Amino acid sequence: MELIETARGPINVSFGCAFPDPSFLPAKKMSAILGRAARISPLLAAEYQLPPGYEPLRRQIARRSPEFGCNFTHNNLVITNGAMEAVHLSLRAVAKAGDVIAVESPIYYGAMEAIDSLGMRMIEIPTHPRQGIDLNVLEDAIRKHGVKACFAMTNVHNPLGFVLETDRKRELAALAARYQVPVIEDDVYGDFVFGTGGRTTAKQFDREGLVLYCGSVSKSLGGGYRMGWLEPGRFRKTVERLQFTSTIGAPSLQQIALADLLASGGYERHVRKLRSAFERNMAIFREAIARYFPAGTRMTRPAGGFVLWVQLPGRASALALYEAARAQGISVLPGDAFSPGNQYPDYIRMNCGYNWSDTYDAAVRTLGRLCAGLPRVT
Ligand SMILES: Cc1ncc(COP(=O)(O)O)c(C=O)c1O
């Protein structure tokens, strides 16, 4: 929690968080849409939206689903408080305390903490920075360790940035079916696959309702709206009951507003712009890191999104860099946050979702300079 809090402040340059530049977010437009929803539907906005959530919004999400290879019906979608609730509900629906969850390594720390907080255990599956999760090792783990479920990011992995090949997504869904092991597919960054934005998912190959598909608009519109969704496959009833007993449902006003935005086509236009802004900025950040960090530094070449995974040279301590940078008003997120077995003590994750400016240039230069005097990890 301390690492995550530092990413937010008080700090001048936050490379530690995974949140796009505020100037990229359509805050004014969202205020207008929220205002209109509150004026036109004040009573609806004041009412609970019980699970599965506001039907017009579920219909809009179902309408978009062919963009990621699926053909959802609104009847099997649940609106959640961000993707985080979708992940949490999925875990609770398919496993219990003591069960083993197979996770990619490195893994998004929010999912890691969720699994841990539910008393579940994790088994880390080696995950290649371009090719993704090792499906042979995953299959072995399922056979040998009684894995109850798998958590995977198939598009724009956080922190590695890869997009899993379609054949591998198909194979992941086939593994789920062969061993009857649910897969929780987190597609929070899916809209930001560089290029045309078209993408595939493991969910599209799921014929047995074993893939629980999680999404949200946190990275495109803002995390504060807490708008996400879950297509829970065969676990819908359980998920709805679990949601009712924890948050009752997602906030009504935001659901009405988001349904409006999606219906207007404005979301599609916004995401297209955002995607190219991220691609541009990613190239600039990578160049700056190559210029300012010491020789031997390695970094990913993400296929989308806005985070970079950087390996410091000579086994330099990422935690030491985090401390030194913090003293200079800069945050980075050390690799410690991304592995239950602490396998990445010499890695950092950097947010490149900023509109490049002299401030970021100077901050990357400072980080590069700090890298020179770091202790090694043992
Ligand atoms: C991979 C991943 N999943 C889920 C979340 C949480 O998303 P939300 O804000 O929609 O709950 C994040 C946020 O950083 C994330 O990076």
Image (cartoon, rainbow, N blue to C red):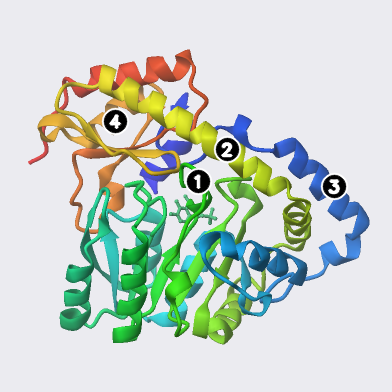
* Residue wearing tag 3: 35
Q: Nearer the viewer, mark 2 or mark 3?
A: 2
Q: What is the secondary structure assignment of the residue under circle 2?
A: helix
Residue 22: % across, % down:
60, 33
The Cα atoms of the two marked residues, 4 and 1, are separated by 31 Å
- Count of labels shown? 4
Q: Are marks 2 and 4 in contact (CB under 8 Å)?
A: no
Label 4 or label 1, whichever comes before in sequence order = 1
Judge left or right: residue 115 versus residue 35: left
Q: Which residue is painted at 75% across and 72% down in the image?
A: 55
Q: Quadrant of residue 139?
A: bottom left
Front-most of 257 and 75?
Answer: 75
When asked about the image quadrant of residue 226, the answer is bottom right
* Kind of element beneath mark 3: helix
* Disc 1 CB within 8 Å of nearest ligand 1 atom: no
Disc 3 crowd, CA 10 A, few/some/many (<14, 14-19, 20+): some
Structural crowding at the residue carrying mark 4, measured as other residues with C-alpha within 10 Å and reported as few (<14), some (14–19) or many (≥20): some
Q: Amino acid at mark 4?
A: Glu
Identify residue type, mark 2: Leu
Give SS at disc 4. helix
Query: How many angstroms separate mark 3 from mark 1 (CA)?
Result: 28 Å
The answer to whether 112 is drawn above or below residue 365 in the figure is below
Q: Which residue is mark 2?
A: 274
Point 11% across, 38% down: residue: 377
Q: Earlier in the sequence, mark 2 or mark 4?
A: 2
Viewer-nearest residue: 280 or 219: 280
Q: Distance between the Cα atoms at labels 2 and 3?
A: 24 Å
Residue at image coords 51%, 80%: 233
Q: Which residue is mark 4?
A: 323
Q: Is residue 236 above or below residue 214?
A: below
The reply to whether residue 54 is in sight is: yes
Residue beneath label 1, please? 192
